[in-house]
Amino acid sequence: MTQSPTPGTEAIAASLSRIKARIAAACERAVRDPATVTLVAVSKTHPAEAVLAALEAGQAVFGENRVQEAAGKFPALRPDHPGLRLHIIGGLQTNKARDAVRVADTIESLDRPKLAAALAEAIAKEGRAPGLLIQVNTGAEPQKSGIARDEAAAFLRACREEHGLAISGAMCIPPEGEDPVPHFRWLADFARDQGLPVLSMGMSGDFEAAIACGATQVRVGSAIFGARPYPAAP
């Protein structure tokens, strides 16, 4: 069964307005400045027209899972939208590291030594260094990307000392169906202890809880763009 199509320009603008109002309200409850929270609009599987609609509504930061999909949408939009910023938030294969460095402003899914080495090599070759976040698999889910909790500190050290990578933050995706707050609190403690200023956590269903726990970036997709238009099963 095919999911609903991407909403039109006015619907996307209205959804963005609602999400930004909820972010502001969550910040007020947490006694935080809304300017300390960046909304990453997750546009994966949605067409370039949806991204353009969000851009025209004032949104600047977007998230994509796949490098190839991102490369097909965003380069053509950048000349007319110099403030546009693209985050790669999905699991990244080492053979896509150089493509990711070329297209992304931030890569949020650094999660293993081989990828750290590939990114360091790509950055050296491209002369371009996107922001880098370590993804932690806080729920120890075998099907999910992310470094294990008990390996995260040593991995961060290796990224910095062995590979010369400038790591700016940490990211997590709590297990579906679990209370996300303990996961958010763990990541916030880890980021604080490691001197990482960027904390990417919280999605459409739980970003307000993430803000209460200290998130500086929230990744919201379906609440802005609607259900993702995956193709119907054959």
Image (cartoon, helix red, strand yellow):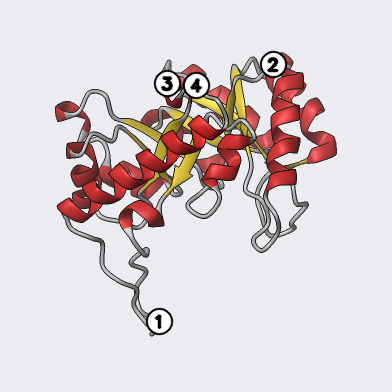
Q: Dot 3 surroundings within 10 Å: few (below 14), some, or many (20 or more)? A: few
Q: Residue at the right extreme?
A: 150
The mark lying in front, picked from 1 and 2, is 2
Q: Label 4 amino acid?
A: Ile
Q: Label 1 amino acid?
A: Ala
**What distance separates the C-alpha of mark 3 from that of mark 1?**
39 Å
**What distance separates the C-alpha of mark 4 from that of mark 2?**
23 Å
On screen, residue 18 versus residue 39, left or right, reads: left
The relative height of residue 218 versus residue 33 in the rendered view (above or below) is below
Tag 4–tag 2 contact (CB < 8 Å): no
To which residue does mark 2 refer? 195
Under circle 4, the secondary element is helix
To which residue does mark 3 refer? 126
Under circle 3, the secondary element is helix
To which residue does mark 4 refer? 123
The mark lying in front, picked from 1 and 4, is 1
Q: Position of residue 205 (x, y in %)?
A: 52, 55
* Residue 85 visible within the image: yes
To which residue does mark 1 refer? 233
Which comes sooner in the sequence, label 1 or label 2? 2
Q: Which residue is depicted at the point 61% across and 25% down? A: 169
Q: Which residue is depicted at the point 66% across and 63% down? A: 177
Which comes sooner in the sequence, label 2 or label 3? 3
Q: Label 2 amino acid?
A: Gly
